[in-house]
Amino acid sequence: MSELSDIKVTDRFSLTGKAFVITGGARGIGFATAKAIAQLGGSVALIDVLDKPVDEFDTLTKRFNVKASYQRADITDQKSLETAFDESVKAMGGQIHGGVCGAGININQPLIEADWDYSLKLLQVNLMGTYWTAKLIAKHLAETKTPGSIVCIASLSGQGIHIPVQDAAIYNASKAGIKGMMGPLAVELGKYGIRINSVSPGAIHSPMTASLEQDAPQLLKWFKDAAPVQRMGVPEDITPTICLLLSDAGAFTTGADMVITGGIHAGRNDFVLPGEGAQWLQSATK
C-alpha cells in the first residue's frame, strides 16, 4: 500500500505551515497566487519592482491567519534581488518551502523596429530573473534540507504557436526559454527533494494586458474569439494549478509545463475558409 493511500485527497492540497516567495507578486497572476496560497494556509513573501502591492495585500494576514511580507526589488539587479530574497526569508521566520517565479514584462515590436535596450531588459526580467530566482529558492531549500517546489510562469507564447496579430518574437523566446529550463532543472534538483515545473497561461485579463484594450484591441478580440472556451482567462483560472504544483498533491510532478490557455494551444476558432469554401461549409452544415 502507498503511504499516501490513507491521506484524504483534500489534505494533500493544504499549504498550512508552509511559506513561499513570489516574484511579480504585487498584482495580476502574482498577487492572485499569493491570495490562493493564503487561502490554503500558506504564508507569502512578495517581491516586485512596484512601490507597493494592491491594497488587498494588507488584508491577507488578518483574513487567513498567515504571514505576509512585501519587498521592493529590481529583478534585473543581482544585489537588489538577493537582498529582497534574504529579507523575505527572514520575514517568513527563516524557512520557505518553495516559490513562484512570476516577474515578467511584455513587448510588441516587429523585428526591424526592435529596440536593443528594451529587448535586453525583457530577457533580463523574464529569463534571467526567473533563472536566478529559481536558483535562490533551490539553494535555500538544499542548504536547509527542505523538500520543496518551484513554479515558473511561462506562457502560451512560448509554445511555438504563431499569434497572427502580435509581433513578439523576443517575448516568445523568453517564455520558451523558461519552459526549456524545466527538464534539466528537474533532473538537477530532484536529488534534493525539489520539484520544479512551469505553467503556461494563455491570454489572461491582468495589468499586463489592460493597455491592449486601447493599444491593440484586435489582439484582445483574437484571444477571445480564437479560444475554444470563447473568453479570455482571469488570474484565478491559473492559480489552482500553481497551488497544485506547490502542494503535496503535485508530489509526483516535476519537469512539466502545464498549459492553461482556454484551449487555444489545441485548436483555434479563427480559421475561416475563403470564398466558395466558406459558402460550401455553411450550406453543408445547415
Image (cartoon, helix red, strand yellow):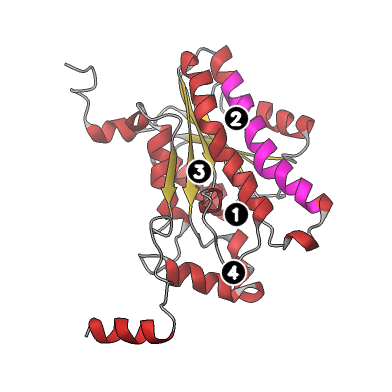
Query: Mark 3 highlights which residue?
Result: 34
Query: Mark 4 highlights which residue?
Result: 165
Give residue 134's mark.
Answer: 2
> Earlier along the polypeptide chain: callout 4 or callout 2?
2
Question: Where is 250 relative to 226, above or below?
Answer: above
Residue type highlighted by circle 4: Val
**Residue in view at x 72 percent, y 62 percent:** 109
Please give left or right for residue 284 compared with residue 198 in the image.
left
> Earlier along the polypeptide chain: callout 3 or callout 4?
3
Residue 82: give x, y in percent of width and height: 72, 28
Quadrant of the snapshot with the N terminus? top left
**Residue in view at x 64 percent, y 32 percent:** 131
Using a 10 Å C-alpha cutoff, classify the residue at mark 4 as few (fewer than 14 neighbours), some (14 to 19) or many (20 or more).
Answer: few
Query: Mark 1 highlights which residue?
Result: 54
> Contact (CB < 8 A) between labels 4 and 1?
no
> Earlier along the polypeptide chain: callout 2 or callout 3?
3
- Magenta residue span: 118-139
> Earlier along the polypeptide chain: callout 2 or callout 1?
1
